[in-house]
Image (spheres, grey):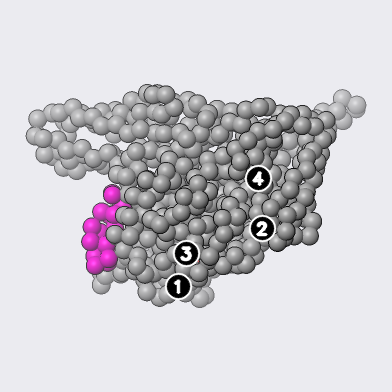
Amino acid sequence: MKKVLLLIITLTLIAFYFSSISAEKPGQAFRADYDGLAMTPPMGWYPWNTFGQEPQNEKLIKEMVEALISSGMREAGYLYVGPDEGICYYRASDGKLTTNLERYPSGLRGLGDYIHQRGLKYALYTDAGTLTCSKAMPGTKGHEFEDMRQFAEWRTDYLKIDWCNTKGQDIVQTYTLLNEAQRAAGRPLVHSLCSWGVGEPWKWAAAVGHLWRTTGDICEPGKADWNSAMKIVFANEKLYEYAGPGHWNDPDMMIVGMPGLSEAQNRSLFSLWCMMAAPLIAGNDLRQMSESTRQILTNIEVIAIDQDPLGIQGHIIRQEGQVSIWGQKKLFDGSQAVLIFNQNNSPSQVTISWDELGFSRAASLYVRDLWKHQTTGPITRGLSVTVPPNDVIMLRLSRSKDFPLPPIISADTYLISLHSKSSKPEKLSASLTIHNAGKVDLPLWKVHGPLPPWLFVKITKKGNNQIITNQINTAGLSPGYYHTIVRLDNTEPISKRPMSAFYYEVELEVK
Ligand code: GLA
């Protein structure tokens, strides 16, 4: 009897341990299980917060693409970029979505190809109702399958689906149908639900999408609103149990770097988003970003908290007046992130103790200040800090002196385009490079599933990078156009968690 009791206690403890390191509930279905997408919160740039509908056009998006690259944001993991609501397509008389060529002269497919060639991923916007919010563009209602085929043809990688003009529609059925339509279209795609918390998507949407807005809009276009951002933070915080790899609470695009915000507010907002494992979609004008904003948005040690492979959303563990202490953000290497947010107009002294974070009081911990980039310690019991007014202190605590950064992946291109010169059999080759801004050395990426017979993929290491060589043999191919999407998989070596699948495309024209 004693043995059985001991076994039950041990099993309960093991189950408790695993449930505490992962937000996933047994038996829950996740869309990310089959597409491997967004295993860490998606990062990118979207135009809405700064521009609204005007002037969204091809030139603007391409300028942002270049700014993402030159600012170092691409290498820091910001990948998804494209138009939000901004009349980029209309519905033609045959029912098909068609590019608004006045604004997008290369066509929406041409813009997608440009974005992919520049090593970024393509984001587009639509609505689940009859029309988009401003009623300027068509929604998908009644056209779900053909529209998702069109988004696939445009080579969309990320689709935000709004919830305007949906009178009489059942929200679960609608987004479920859109998920089926996306799967039928055959292109892997990050599905971003945007119902502003309507229908409590955190309770059901992980099966049909990868992220869902939890609240209303963070601001009117062009008008950063700090108070509205704070309301969003404290509403989103409460939903921490629902987030995890492949399924995220989305408190909206960021307002970091928009006019009217102080440096301390920018730092605070960014830290809060990272502590909440929120999608990091920048919304500022990247072409005119100050150096301070650039440094905040590319602080890799803070991004590492957001992009941690365990995918845990941190939350408030103690509130003292206008000071909130955020914790329970366990990280892949056994360390933890802590955020102290002071909303007072004066400095606040705060003491945190190791036991309130789940460490033992006697634990000897190294303390890394993620904004000052300094390590102190080892320290036992706890520590006292003074947080400047309306600012944060963000720390990472570890038993070890090392603070490894998890993998943060980018690539120099996502589209390999090759053309044969004649009808004679030819051997063609082109490579792409996968960078890892993290400090963990990755195993080799592995090809998932069969490749077409004309393509052979070889993967080699070069320092921290991996080179993906694509070898093509046109022997036996009749003239025409060939296209395939290659999926590569990997596992983070310390926590052993699967990483977001790496997809890229190879197209070939045979004469
Ligand atoms: C909604 C969304 C915003 C933006 C606008 C476009 O309000 O929540 O993020 O996409 O629609 O009209």
Residue at 80%, 32% in the rendered image: 380
Mark carried by residue 394 = 4
The crowd level at tag 3 (other Cα within 10 Å; few <14, some 14-19, many 20+) is many
Residue 5: name its quadrant.
top right
Mark carried by residue 75 = none
Amino acid beneath label 2: Asn
Residue 274 appearing in the image: yes
- Residues tagged 3 and 4 counted as in contact (Cβ below 8 A): no
- Mark 3 residue CB less than 8 A from any atom of ligand 1: yes
* Marks 3, 4: nearer the viewer: 4
Query: How far apart are the alpha carbons under marks 1 and 2?
Result: 34 Å
Q: Which residue is mark 2?
A: 390
Query: How far apart are the alpha carbons under marks 3 and 1?
Result: 15 Å
Percent coordinates x, y for residue 65 in the rendering: 35, 51
* Marks 1, 2: nearer the viewer: 2
Q: Is 154 placed left or right of 159 in the picture?
A: left
- Mark 1 residue CB less than 8 A from any atom of ligand 1: yes
Q: Is 488 placed left or right of 106 in the picture?
A: right
Q: Is 335 placed left or right of 253 in the picture?
A: right
Residue numbers of the magenta segment? 97-114
The crowd level at tag 4 (other Cα within 10 Å; few <14, some 14-19, many 20+) is many
Residue at the farthest right position: 2
Q: Which SS class for mark 2?
A: loop
Q: Which residue is mark 1?
A: 133
* Marks 4, 1: nearer the viewer: 4
Amino acid beneath label 4: Met
Q: Which SS class for mark 1?
A: loop
Q: Quadrant of the N terminus?
A: top right
Percent coordinates x, y for residue 371 in the rendering: 60, 43
Amino acid beneath label 1: Cys
